[in-house]
Amino acid sequence: MFNRFFLSFIVLSIFLIGWTLPRNNNPYIVILGIAQDGGAPHAACTKECCINKWDNPKLHNQVSSIGIVDPLTNEIWMIDATPDFSLQLNTLTMEQKGVFKGVFLTHAHIGHYTGLIHLGREVMGAKEIPVYAMPKMENFLSNNGPWSQLVDLNNIDIKSLKNNTTVKLNSNLSITPFLVPHRDEFSETVGYKIEGPNKSLIFIPDIDKWEKWTKNIKEVVEENDYSLLDGTFFDINELPGRDMSKIPHPFIVESMEVLSDVDSKSSVHFIHLNHTNPALDSYSTATKTIKNNGFNIARRNQKFHL
């Protein structure tokens, strides 16, 4: 009898403690996709890295994008409008249960802005969705079809961004774009710093070699709580027959070397992985190497509380 009473008391106590614990209502970042612009599997790819993924949607990797969620205000934002926009918007509005407040764009490469087409009259017929863009990106959207139609029909409302100028999203959140070197055929390229009440996160999905940047990536990582960094290619051997100097992303092995002596290596999560990148496989030698060196790989639906 005593044991039964004692057990009931423990169960009730645990229930009451769980009931009274406050929810974590801090804003957070959620990973919507981790793959390079073409996703994985990749169009026309029949190599080993893709062949087993075509018939298994559970193995598909959506294109690199993140969501910003504020549970207190029920607001959500997206960084980059990818070819997987419809699935990623559904993740934000249905699974995260927020009101869509706009898109921040990094640059004019196809995996980062072409999802805007879903806001047009052929699909959503959206009304004045804020699209935050740097000057060249704004000019590109405004003066080239079919994107200009989104502007003309008021499907989107372009909000101008300036380098290193902070945009206050609400009383809990702010976001700051900063220029990074990249192949800027149609627009400049930016990364973003997102700040919440307690923590900050850096998002740099696309950049050329770290030495081309005026900022010191080690200092940037150490100054922020989380860093989502360009992990397009694991090493130079990934694309046989291709001139890798024409696509000069920092290899993950290079980034790990540059950041080898930072104290916060575990805060670094590589994102924007090409379909050939062995780190997409959780059980690969590449993944083990990254983990053994103290770093991480971003995973879809992963959350970073701010």
Image (cartoon, rainbow, N blue to C red):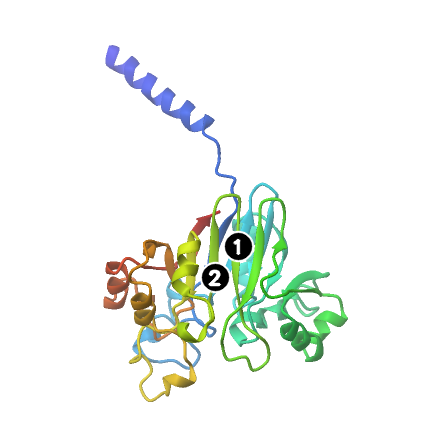
- Kind of residue at badge 1: Ile
Q: Secondary structure at mark 1?
A: strand
| Image-based side of 220 in relation to 265, left or right | right
Where 180 sits versus 306, above or below? below
In the image, 163 versus 295, the foreground residue is 163
Q: Are marks 1 and 2 in contact (CB under 8 Å)?
A: yes
User: Horizontal and vertical percent for residue 82?
Assistant: 53, 68
| Image-based side of 55 in relation to 106, left or right | left
What's the residue at 51%, 72% (across, down)?
111
In the rendered image, which quarter contains the N terminus?
top left
User: Horizontal and vertical percent for residue 222?
Assistant: 39, 56
- Kind of residue at badge 2: Phe
Tag 1 residue: 194
- Work out how far the residue at label 1 is from the one at label 2, CA to CA, in angstroms: 8 Å
Tag 2 residue: 203
Quarter occupied by residue 53:
bottom left
| Image-based side of 151 in relation to 54, left or right | right
Query: Can residue 185 be seen by looking at this rendering?
Result: yes
In the image, 173 versus 108, the foreground residue is 173
What's the residue at 33%, 16% (across, down)?
9
User: Horizontal and vertical percent for residue 303?
Assistant: 44, 50
| Image-based side of 139 in relation to 206, left or right | right
In the image, 94 versus 71, the foreground residue is 71
